Image (tube, rainbow, N blue to C red):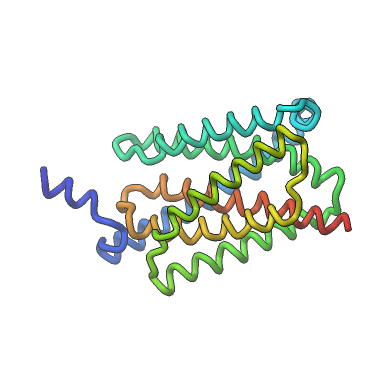
């Protein structure tokens, strides 16, 4: 029993090459499926009758966006807890599914604005930029094999600062602007380096669902703020 438990806690980098390769394939396949599911859910939400009332609630009610953000953070906390539960595969998939749905709701207002009030090029441009940046950052981790876990405390502090600024902007009604979006792109890029490294160095080979959720979170955050930058620049 102890040997089995020990085997289950071996990190991806310490595992046999075949097990490591299988983990990587499964993780990135789940990431691709999560992104595809996000696109499908987003399309369905945009076609539904709830989209306009929801957008009006977010932008028309003073603390509407704050409520959505709070609900999103709660769903994210719950989803992460479920996705790393190695004792139950169905709970892992439930966590990933819940997180994809939460991000679809978060994206809904900005995607609605991009479609109706911006150039038709902004969405594909933001998607391409996100894909290129994610591929490049992932390659850095895989090629260098550097452990970026030292970035954890930096990202935590940056995350709290960003959250505080977002809450203040909602409460006091000011626009954070391009500089903040640029900061968040840098933050999300750091998160991709950190999460990819942590997945390889600290996850076991049976945690591919939880690993895909962490990577999905960073990719979604990167796209969210790249889209805001592209939309802002397209209006100038």
Q: Is residue 224 left or right of residue 188?
A: right
Percent position of residue 53, x then y: 78, 25
Q: Residue at x 77, y 41 (%)?
A: 174
Percent position of residue 73, x then y: 54, 35
Q: Residue at x 33, y 34 (%)?
A: 88
Image height of 115 relative to 46, above or below = below
Considering depth in this image, is 230 or 190 the residue closer to the camera?
190
Percent position of residue 8, x then y: 23, 49
Find residue 196 and report its image quarter.
bottom left
Find residue 17 and report its image quarter.
bottom left
Find residue 184 and report its image quarter.
bottom right
Image height of 101 relative to 148, above or below = above
Q: Residue at x 72, y 56 (%)?
A: 179
Q: For the C terminus, which image quadrant?
A: bottom right
Percent position of residue 91, x then y: 39, 33
Considering depth in this image, is 51 or 18 the residue closer to the camera?
51
Q: Residue at x 57, y 55 (%)?
A: 188
Number of numbered labels in the structure image: 0
Q: For the N terminus, which image quadrant?
A: top left
């Amino acid at each position: 029993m102890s040997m089995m438990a020990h085997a289950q806690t071996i990190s991806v980098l310490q595992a046999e090459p075949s097990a490591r390769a299988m983990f990587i394939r499964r993780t990135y396949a789940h990431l691709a499926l999560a992104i595809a599911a996000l696109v499908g859910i987003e399309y369905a939400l945009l076609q539904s009758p709830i989209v306009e009332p929801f957008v009006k609630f977010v932008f028309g009610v003073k603390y509407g966006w704050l409520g959505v953000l709070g609900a999103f953070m709660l769903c994210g906390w719950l989803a992460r807890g479920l996705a790393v539960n190695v004792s139950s595969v169905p709970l892992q998939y439930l966590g990933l599914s819940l997180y994809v749905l939460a991000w679809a709701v978060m994206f809904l207002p900005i995607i609605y604005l991009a479609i109706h009030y911006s150039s038709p090029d902004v969405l594909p441009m933001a998607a391409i930029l996100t894909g290129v940046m994610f591929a490049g950052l992932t390659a850095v981790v895989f090629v260098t094999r550097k452990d970026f876990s030292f970035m954890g405390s930096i990202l935590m502090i940056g995350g709290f600062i960003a959250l505080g600024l977002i809450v203040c902007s909602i409460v006091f009604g000011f626009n954070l602007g391009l500089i903040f979006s640029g900061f968040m792109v840098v933050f999300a890029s750091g998160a991709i380096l950190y999460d990819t490294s942590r997945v390889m160095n600290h996850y076991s080979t049976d945690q591919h669902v939880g690993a895909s959720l962490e990577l999905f979170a960073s990719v979604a955050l990167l796209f969210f703020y790249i889209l805001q930058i592209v939309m802002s620049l397209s209006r100038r």
